[in-house]
């Protein structure tokens, strides 16, 4: 089922979560171990992230460095298909990014999803690879997620890149996009960021999943600002429970988000990562309950390969 239909057909808040493909060299059993404890809470859908190639330098015995292009977490398409067939009641939402994809590559990826019967996509630009500061699209690739949404919508109208194709089959993708309650890192200001978010919706995206946030007021203001800007689609809050003490420093840096003072105080009392894990569960549980009270369509959790915290949260929330 399309994510937008899950939302339209439900009067209560739904549950969903995001998974990362395993690091190259590991098998899919870790994915199933993450999913299994969460199945009793009837997730409506599971997202699978997409990871583009990165440049790494391999040191040889001679001391010379070899530049290599690697994909550390391959397998998004295969994992999506494997989950779809193992858990037929759950929909999968593979992420598709602009980075590393030409338009042709994008079309082939969409054809694969279409043939696999996967009709939900989260369309993203992707971050610049670690060694680069600025996002650079592939030759003939998309610079912004908005253009990726447009390409998918073209295929939904039966328009492929080769306009000489005849009697083409129209795809039927339901597309979601990312939104940033605390503004995207590269955006000069909130108003500009919202203008570009609206472009993605006008291009055909049907819902938004937000970046993580730890202060629900940021989400409430974001929803209001979106509505004022004419963005009327469902806005799904994304939540990532804190799991380690290190998160306090890394999350703001990587995701351009604030950790509220009260949460920092609680984390500063922790003597171990185990303590921080419990604080993360408690904070996220309170956030989740308030968001349900607000009437959010879905609570979407970023698992980062750990499901015990999500299990504890959803068991007291749903
Ligand atoms: P865009 O919507 O293209 O926006 C990128 C920046 O450009 C923003 O600052 C925006 O304001 C600006 N902008 C947009 N359009 C224009 C325009 N026409 N002119 C000028 N500026 C413009 N990354 C991955 O690599 N893989 C994943 O699986 C993944 N999953 C994610 C899931 C969620 C829920 C979220 C919130 C993020 C995810 N990301 C993922 C991270 C995402 O790719 C990065 O945040 C990326 O930097 C921006 O992606 P976007 O789709 O929001 O980009």
Image (cartoon, rainbow, N blue to C red):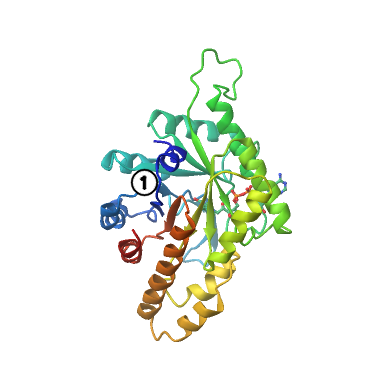
What crowding class fits label 1: few (fewer than 14 Cα within 10 Å), some (14-19), or many (20 or more)? many
Which residue lies under the disc numbered 1?
44
Is residue 229 or residue 95 the one in the foreground?
Answer: 229
In the rendered image, residue 208, in percent from the top left (x then y), is placed at 54, 48
Compared to residue 192, the image places residue 162 above or below, namely above
Q: Is residue 88 visible?
A: yes
**Residue 276 location (% of width, % of height):** 40, 78
35 lies left or right of 127:
left
* Quadrant of the image containing the C terminus: bottom left
For the point 33% across and 43% down, the residue is 90
Q: Position of residue 291 (x, y in %)?
A: 47, 60
Q: Quadrant of residue 140?
A: top right
* Residue 143 is at least partly visible in this image: no
| Quadrant holding the N terminus | top left
Looking at the picture, tell me which residue is in the foreground, 267 or 142.
Answer: 267
Secondary structure state at the residue bearing disc 1 = loop
Counting the numbered discs, the total is 1
Whole-percent x, y for residue 204 in the image: 59, 35
Residue nearest the observer in this picture, 60 or 121 = 121
In the picture shown, does residue 4 fall above or below 58? above
């Amino acid at each position: 089922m399309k994510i937008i239909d899950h939302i339209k057909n439900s009067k209560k808040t739904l549950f969903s979560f995001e998974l990362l493909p395993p690091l190259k060299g590991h098998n899919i059993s870790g994915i199933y171990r993450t999913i299994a404890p969460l199945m009793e809470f009837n997730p409506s859908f599971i997202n699978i992230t997409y990871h583009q190639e990165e440049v790494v330098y391999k040191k040889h015995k001679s001391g010379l460095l070899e530049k290599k292009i690697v994909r550390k977490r391959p397998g998004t398409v295969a994992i999506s298909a494997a989950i779809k067939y193992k858990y037929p009641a759950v929909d999968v939402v593979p992420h598709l990014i602009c980075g590393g994809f030409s338009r042709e590559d994008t079309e082939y990826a969409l054809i694969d999803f279409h043939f696999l019967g996967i009709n939900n996509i989260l369309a993203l630009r992707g971050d610049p690879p670690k060694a680069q500061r600025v996002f650079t699209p592939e030759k003939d690739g998309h610079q912004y997620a908005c253009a990726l949404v447009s390409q998918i919508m073209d295929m939904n109208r039966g328009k492929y890149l080769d306009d000489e194709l005849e009697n083409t089959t129209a795809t039927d993708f339901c597309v979601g996009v990312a939104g940033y309650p605390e503004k995207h890192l590269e955006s000069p200001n909130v108003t500009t960021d919202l203008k570009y978010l609206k472009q993605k919706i006008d291009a055909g995206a049907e819902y938004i999943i937000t970046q993580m946030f730890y202060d629900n007021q940021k989400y409430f203001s974001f929803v209001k600002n979106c509505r004022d800007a004419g963005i009327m689609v469902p806005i799904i809050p994304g939540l990532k429970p804190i799991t380690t003490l290190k998160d306090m420093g890394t999350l703001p840096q990587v995701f351009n988000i604030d950790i509220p003072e009260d949460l920092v105080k609680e984390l500063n009392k922790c003597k171990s990562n185990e303590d921080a894990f419990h604080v993360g569960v408690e904070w996220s549980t309170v956030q989740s309950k308030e968001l349900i009270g607000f009437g959010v369509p879905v609570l979407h959790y970023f698992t980062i390969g750990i499901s015990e915290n999500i299990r504890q949260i959803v068991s007291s929330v749903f």
